[in-house]
Amino acid sequence: MKFVRVRAVAKKEIIQIWRDPLSLTIAFLMPLIQLFIFGYAITFDINNINAVVYDRDRSYESRELVSEMSSSGYFSIIGHIDSYKEVDSYIDLNKAKVAVIIPEDFSKAIKTGRPAQVGVIIDGSDSNTATIADGYLNGIALQFSRRMSGVKIEPVIDIRSRVWYNPELKSRNFIVPGLIVVIMAVIVALLTSLTVAREWERGTMEQLISTPVKPAELIIGKLIPYFAIGLIDIIVALLAGVFWFGVPIYGSPLLLLALACIFMFGGVCTGIIISINAKGSQSVASQIALLSSFLPALLLSGFVFAISNMPVPLQIITYLIPARYFVTISKSIFMKGSGLETLMVETLLLTIYSAVVFAVAVKKFSKRID
Amino acid sequence: MNNEHAVVVEGLTRRFGDFVAVDNISLDIRKGEVFGFLGPNGAGKSTTIKMLCGLLLPSEGKGVVGGFDIMRQSEEIKKHIGYMSQKFSLYEDLTVEENIDFFSGIYSVPAPKARERKEWVINMAGLGERRKAITGTLPGGFKQRLALGCAIIHEPPMLFLDEPTSGVDPISRRNFWKLIYDISHGGTTVFVTTHYMDEADYCDRLALIYRGKLIAEGSPNELKRDYMKRSVLEIEVDRPVEALDVLEKGGVEAAIFGSLVHATVESSDTAAVNIGNLLGQSGMVVTKIGKIEPSLEDVFVTLIETA
């Protein structure tokens, strides 16, 4: 391995990126656009869920609970009802997504310090909204019981996971950490996927392979600039996430950057492998790169859909997707403040993945035409 | 392999599926000579040069280039040669200087030497005024000389040029050959492929390849002497295409050269009279007919027709 050769390749590649408007756009503009689209337009927060209340207690406490619900902004109380039958009709006719049933002994239970139960019926036909509504209700119940000082109130259905780490129930707080992963996976794979294919397409590769440059030198030289771009992108995304969107980061940003480097290294090498296989066609290379980076990072990484909810065969596949590990890392550092010691397994698997793809890239890169 | 030869290969064959691109070729190229590899498009010239440069693995054969085995030491070969591919292969989006610097780096030319070589390349290519110009904006002749300069930035003992003059204007072509001579006089062995027959006379020695097979080898004079036992008549006639038709029907080997017709005959004196009569009977006006010194193109046409 000769440093001068690596440097020559890296320098040339930087100049080429700098003079290519398309590369520059992909490198610096696309991540920002993605961040803002996801940060603003795509939100899993749902407001004004229609709800009906069947208040059988008709007490001060029950009215307080209802006003807590409506003042949260998440629910709009469209009616008060007097029977279970009416619940059916509201939900069946799609007038309400949620029905809250407050039992007769609600205020009595609160006063005597017993756990008070509230029945909640949620329209499960739209499972996403249902889950979210459930999460909101849990949050409201928690807040209400805190206000009633020491008095517990328990809705019948109880899912706590999201409430635990994201008490404000802001979806942005878990979108941004996952989004950073998707952005990096896409940018890095897309940019690097073009670099080798472009050289074949323009005929410069034939000249290059007639020189003594070694595959490893060429690959490292080529990945240095893209690695740097990826690093800049993640720093920008991190700053935008924390300062613009106000997403709290409880762990160490430096640890996140360090682990991002491992993730990116693998991504860059994957891009190069795609580029080698798509010999001579930039468009084929970029399409493969987009499909193989964006979709898995979005759908199978645990960013949008919880892996534990997937069918078992799909769960097994997610182990092969490096974004899966990095999503876990990113979310844990952001939301739980995890340190390296708790992320050991993910870090190790990510490192192995990156090392393997680098070895494959070097091996696949042939200095012959055939 | 001995000290006098830069390239010795035997039985070089390359197949692509069922197609035999290069069929059992043997070559020996002496150090310091300009060796021309001639043939029409698709004859196997590029395939051969790529095998010699270690870019393509031969299906069969053995040999050495610059002292290194073509089957096993292709990376060693690459250190000791310069190669200029058929396509223009510098980075169009880099400036002249950036391209030179890149190849200096790739061939790991030490810094002080690299500065000296850079100036040499810029002078050689006549790019003093355009050193900061984006390579893609240069005229063809300049690009080609710059590509040559980058291929020999590391002063290799051997230079392989694949159709270096294709798609370049005639004046640039002549200038380019002058450069090849200069490089050769500096002691570099030059292997050059071309399909321009008029360039063959510039070479010290030649090999002719046709449909993957080597059909002749030698110096330009040897080729003319050994392969042209018969004579060539040059015929100036008002309708050359029809004349060709008439001659071929009359059993005379003939070919069109520009506006003239060349006929290859056994005995020039009797044939000249016969041909004159033949064309005259067909109503054509023959303004001139005479024996000429055969060109390499005549040699090549004859060889192909008998191949």
Image (tube, rainbow, N blue to C red):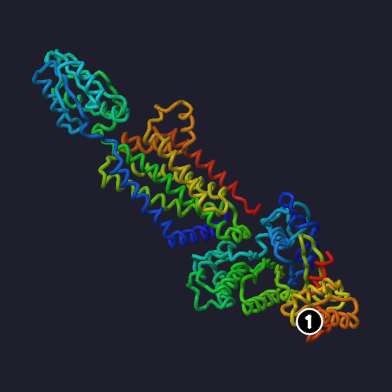
Does residue A259 appear left or right of residue A74 in this picture? right
Does residue A274 appear left or right of residue A232 in this picture? right
Q: Residue at x 58, y 62 (%)?
A: B108
Q: Residue at x 51, y 59 (%)?
A: A7
For the residue pair A339 and A162, the one nearer the viewer reads as A162
Looking at the rendered image, the quarter that the N terminus of chain B falls into is bottom right
**Chain letter belonging to callout 1:** B
Residue A223, compared with residue A116, is above or below; it is: below
Q: Residue at x 78, y 55 (%)?
A: B62
Find residue B38 and report its horizontal and vertical position in percent: 74, 68
Does residue A240 appear left or right of residue B201 in this picture? left
Residue denoted by label 1: B284
Find residue A260 and report its horizontal and vertical position in percent: 41, 44
Does residue B186 appear left or right of residue A221 in this picture? right
Q: Residue furthest bottom?
A: B287
For the residue pair A342 and A199, the one nearer the viewer reads as A199
Residue B258, compared with residue A102, is above or below; it is: below
